[in-house]
Amino acid sequence: MTNTSPNPESARSPSYRPAPHWAAVLAAVFTLPLLYVGGTVTTYRVGMAVPDWPQTFGVNMFLYNFWNAPFGVQVEHTHRLYGAAVGLATLLLCAWLFARERRGWVKALAATALAIVIVQGLLGGFRVTQNSTSLAALHGCLGQVFFALTVALATMTGRDWLSDAEPTPDAKGVRRLSLIVLALIVAQIALGAWVRHFSGLAAAVFHGVVGTAILGVAAHLFVNVKRHEPPKPSLRSATRTVEVLAGLQILLGFASFYALWPFDGMPRVVAFYSAVVRTVHQTNGAVLLAASVVAALRAFRHLGPSPAPSPSLAASPSSSPSVPVDLEVVA
């Protein structure tokens, strides 16, 4: 008699649901322009163009007419309004995942994203009320972390993550390399925030050195994934994306370095194309961070621990039985 009962493991595995996945994708896509707008605030040094918070020049932030305001006020106020919109989108995403998602840890990540966006808004406000450049740098870094978290939610609700494929042994050390790349990029984000907010030639040079190291390790990671058997197409595409973005980041970094030269601390008028290059460099760094998170998540999802060496192979020749003696006896 044929057993038609379902597999207990597959019964416990959640199935792919398009609605939660696309809600997370839309939240991530909606968040990305905010990073560019926030980066523009830093590039033009207009973080204090509006000196009060949560109001704008004593007026309700959502009622303030900023269309005829000076350029700096327009940029900063647009950043505030867009940040509020992203906060609302995150609240809706969290509610949607709590209603439609079965996995408790995904709900916990959604709640974490909501908590981070609230903290991010408070940091932005305190940066103004305290006139703190340090809080501005922290605000910029946390914004990139938040974006990476929204991309992680989109990855974990995707079809590839919920596939029934069993993990295969990590024979090429891909998981370890993916964590190294991620750690280097996190450090690079912090260095970049220091360069953008406090400047300094030494910091900029070290920032470039770390960027070159990221490209080298990312290329090594992609080669190892490419040589892995059996093939992992989604992991390969993720690591290829990291490698391409790392190379693009270096090119944008050189252009930004040229735009900022000389590093003498003297204030200068920021030209339009210079501002675009520097802000795109910062935004691409956030995309690179998110891509490295996706690569690391897929590496640990699709690959298991590397296989341990066989005891028979690890044994020394002197400890193995004397095969020639046995052959002589047989002869």
Image (cartoon, helix red, strand yellow):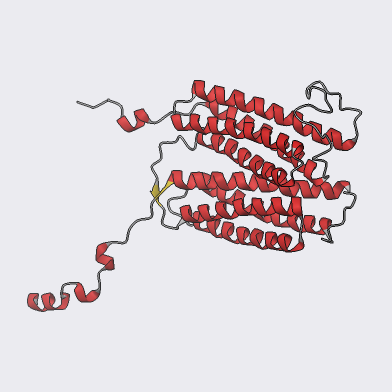
The reply to whether residue 248 is in sight is no
Image vertical order of residue 28 relative to residue 208, above or below: above
- 204 relative to 87, above or below: below
Count of numbered badges drawn on the protein:
0
The quarter of the picture where residue 129 lies is top right
Q: Is residue 64 left or right of residue 144?
A: right
State the residue in front, 34 or 236: 34
Front residue (pair 259, 4): 259
Occupied quadrant, residue 265: bottom right
Determine whether, in the image, residue 184 is placed left or right of residue 9: right
For the view shown, which residue lies furthest in the front direction? 130
Q: Looking at the picture, how far across and down is residue 210, in whole percent? A: 64, 60
Quadrant the N terminus occupies: top left
User: Left of 113 or right of it: where is 106?
Assistant: left
One can see residue 139 in this view: yes
Residue depicted at 89% across the width and 36% down the height: 71
Query: Nearest the camera: 295 or 253?
Result: 253
The image quarter in which residue 314 lies: bottom left
Q: Nearer the viewer, residue 4 or 129?
A: 129
* Residue 113 position in % (x across, y down): 58, 33
Image coords of residue 331 (percent x, y): 9, 77
Q: Residue at the location (76% across, 62% down)?
A: 201
Q: Is residue 144 above or below residue 248?
A: above
- Where residue 58 appears, x then y in whole percent? 83, 25
